[in-house]
Image (cartoon, coloured by chain):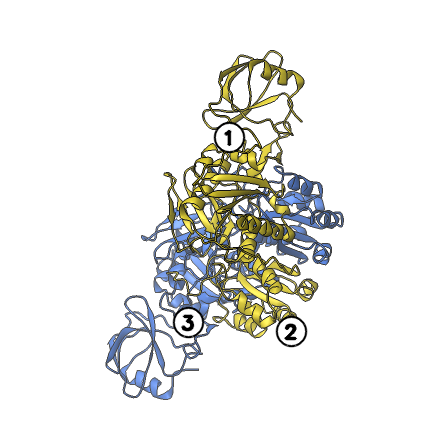
Chain colours: A blue, B yellow
């Protein structure tokens, strides 16, 4: 849907185009702001203005509404057209997947749609073109709860294609729900990727007043171009404000709040880097330097894997099939990684059946240790594999990858317990 | 196992008994400390000394070791015997269940055993008798990963018995692994309990140098006697130090670290109270006042319930039985509470089959909201029930309780969405 005929004519008559600074006077109230793109699903009689405060408002335009152009954009970047390539700047490629960062609210229904093009996103952050030449493409347009294993595989291949075609970094706008899982999958699939690959989301859609989409995107570009590191990372706000960002390892990050802008946390690891108010990137860990070379992603995944949380009252008989029919089971055990003694025979039968049973902790923070209590030692005797401070979600993704990229059970177990992408620590973390 | 004959004789010959301050000289090294009780499973030639630093050491006594008594205990509280009741002090009952707080390390193997009697625990904290008359009993002696639904039921009945017999408060030493689940179960089963019921654990066993068992127990006694509140709570350290404690609502607390002393966190709620260095209890929330009256616990639980975490790649066919054979399913969805669109038909068939499917968030923090995205609206149309800011573990426990204590599906759903024990907030939590 586009603007109504009358609104189109009204805008045209005063010379208002996207980027124009407008004064919109309706019913005695005046709204001053920059005209934002009209989205396909927005109501036809609404203009969206980005206010000086950074907030966007949707203003319904009636016959009696007057619109005045206060200022035209100095340099206008047309939508979906090639912009000039500036020599000397690194090349970043955005690969859109959908999610809130690429969404907008339908002001008629209040619902959120995944519909912004990746170019729309870039055009909303013109300053990004000052630090890099940007190419943008849309790979998917889905909410991340619908990201599946085959999406991870396609995405890893797409990233590799861009890097092999000369990208100095890849930015992946992504829904936040499962961004951590995707980041872990790319971490294992891309291996020594040689360039920064950064997933980024938003907790507020791009046309909501408090959207964090633009600032998160700009932080990604800064991290890629300033730090020149290799690896898969997630960049998100690390405070409720608009000017502080954390760069998380793709295997160590978890969405820890349903709605806050600072929802993403590194678990059992410092963030990889921090980007402050001044736009400067400060590395917090020793990150591998970027390097060239062609990459061949290993996208094989064994889908017959499950992730389960142990809880009191868990019925081993009900989960018989889940354990015996799966090639890999990750359990988020209690405390140091425990299940109750009633579950242990099932763990034993599953491992005897060839299933790899991997133990993590539902505490999320800290390390598994099955040597402290009898329960743990009985679990070890049943053949389970502990993976120390790896979070359950990363262990699930890694187990799928390891099972498809190893040639024996022994090799798979060894790979699970060996850090491949910063997903676990060799040394005991000092807690106190 | 007790001391060896030769060690028993050596101790007897110098008049050393539990509580004696000893100097133990072996191989040119001198250990000075208070003789601790000998535990059943300790090696027969080891004495355990509590050092001035608070650390306990186990010292192997050989023929050439010399033991000297430096000081006898001023007032010795005999083990497992009645102590004088001080009129005017409130009566607290300890009901032991096991766990690290009631454990000690077997110095031969390094393993931890659940064997300290509840009296042992009280005797290790003599100052507790200055604030209350203490009765102690052992109900179970198990690690909490083995706590099951029937243990919760027995424990609720035992608590009710003690309260109906005149206890002004009940303290429940408990393993930390599943303490949050038990606390939630007691919260619903005991309802308007009228007295403080406080679960307490330790992350370090009582005879380990850095044990938090004694200080946590003392904090419980202070909370019970000073604040005189009603309800089920969990008291644990809230810092790495030894002098600051949080009182958590039994339905809002989660073990968030495998090993740190400050592992327990309130989720989506302030702690109920705080106990500081000075031993003063400061209420952080409006807690119901203690009151008298007989209580009748409602211990019915529908065991046919499961707790599942949604993850990308979750196979609805593999979980068919789990959903269709359960009366209640709690899902920790992604983000605002989502599953992927492939799971939704299974949710629909389960709800049509009479199963109550309850949606929480694996983010843990924040509130579910299925009205923002299409996925969520499809889930609502499939008949799922969202429970806002209730954590997954509490939702699982509550669902078991609700299904056994309601007479229709409608009533059960209404109960799930109504705060009964501070487990969910009516009002939208302001995040930003």
User: At which x and y percent is residue A61?
Assistant: 32, 83
Residue neighbourhood size for the residue with mark 3, other residues' Cα within 10 Å, grouped as few (<14), some (14–19), many (≥20): few
| A349 or A373: nearer the viewer | A373
What is the crowding at mark 2: few (fewer than 14 residues within 10 Å), some, or many (at least 20)?
few
Q: Tell me if I can see residue A190 in this picture.
A: no
Q: Residue at x 62, y 48 (%)?
A: B147
Identified at 55% across, 26% down, the residue is B36
Residue pointed to by mark 2: B352
Chain of the residue on which disc 3 is drawn: A
Q: What residue is pinned by disc 1?
A: B209
According to the picture, the residue beneath numbered tag 3 turns out to be A81
- B171 relative to A104, above or below: above
The C terminus of chain B lies in which quarter of the figure? bottom left
Looking at the figure, which quarter contains the N terminus of chain B? top right
- Secondary structure beneath dot 3 equals loop
- Give the Cα separation between the discs numbered 1 and 2: 56 Å
Can the viewer see residue A47? yes
Residue at 45 percent across and 68 percent down: it is A102
Q: Are marks 3 and 2 on the same chain?
A: no
């Amino acid at each position: 849907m586009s603007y109504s005929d009358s609104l189109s004519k009204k805008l045209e008559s005063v010379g208002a185009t996207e980027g124009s600074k407008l004064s919109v006077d309706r019913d005695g109230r005046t709204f001053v702001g920059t005209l934002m793109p009209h989205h396909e699903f927005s109501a036809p009689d609404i203009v969206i203005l980005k206010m000086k405060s950074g907030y966007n408002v949707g203003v319904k335009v009636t016959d009696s509404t007057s619109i005045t152009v206060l200022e035209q954009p100095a340099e206008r970047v047309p939508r979906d057209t090639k912009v000039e390539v500036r020599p000397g700047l690194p090349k970043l490629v955005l690969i859109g997947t959908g999610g809130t960062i690429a969404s907008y609210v339908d002001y008629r229904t209040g619902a959120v749609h995944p519909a912004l093009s990746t170019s729309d996103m870039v055009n909303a952050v013109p300053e990004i073109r000052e630090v890099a030449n940007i190419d943008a493409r849309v790979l998917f347009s889905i909410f991340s709860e619908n990201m599946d294993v085959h999406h991870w595989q396609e995405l890893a291949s797409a990233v590799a294609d861009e890097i092999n075609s000369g990208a100095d970094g890849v930015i992946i706008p992504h829904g936040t729900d499962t961004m951590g899982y995707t980041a872990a999958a790319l971490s294992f699939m891309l291996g020594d990727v040689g360039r920064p690959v950064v997933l980024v989301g938003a907790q507020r859609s791009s046309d909501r007043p408090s959207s964090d989409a633009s600032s998160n995107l700009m932080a990604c570009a800064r991290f890629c171009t300033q730090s020149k590191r290799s690896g898969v990372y997630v960049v998100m706000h690390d405070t409720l404000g608009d000017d502080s960002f954390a760069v998380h390892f793709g295997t160590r990050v978890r969405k820890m709040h349903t709605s806050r802008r600072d929802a993403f946390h590194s678990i059992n690891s410092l963030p990889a880097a921090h980007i402050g108010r001044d736009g400067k990137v400060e590395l917090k860990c020793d990150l591998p330097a970027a390097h060239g070379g062609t990459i061949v992603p290993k996208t094989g995944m064994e889908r017959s894997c499950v992730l389960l949380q142990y809880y009191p009252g868990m019925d081993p008989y009900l989960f018989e099939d889940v354990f015996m029919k799966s090639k890999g089971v990750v359990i988020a055990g209690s405390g140091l990684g425990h299940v109750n003694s009633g579950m242990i025979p099932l763990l034993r039968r599953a491992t005897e059946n060839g299933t790899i049973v991997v133990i993590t902790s539902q505490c999320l923070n800290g390390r598994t240790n099955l040597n402290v209590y009898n329960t743990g030692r009985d679990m070890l005797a049943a053949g389970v594999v502990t993976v120390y401070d790896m979070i359950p979600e990363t262990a699930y993704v890694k187990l799928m990858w390891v099972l498809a990229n190893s040639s024996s059970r022994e090799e798979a177990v060894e790979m699970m317990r060996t850090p491949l992408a910063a997903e676990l620590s060799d040394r005991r973390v000092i807690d106190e």
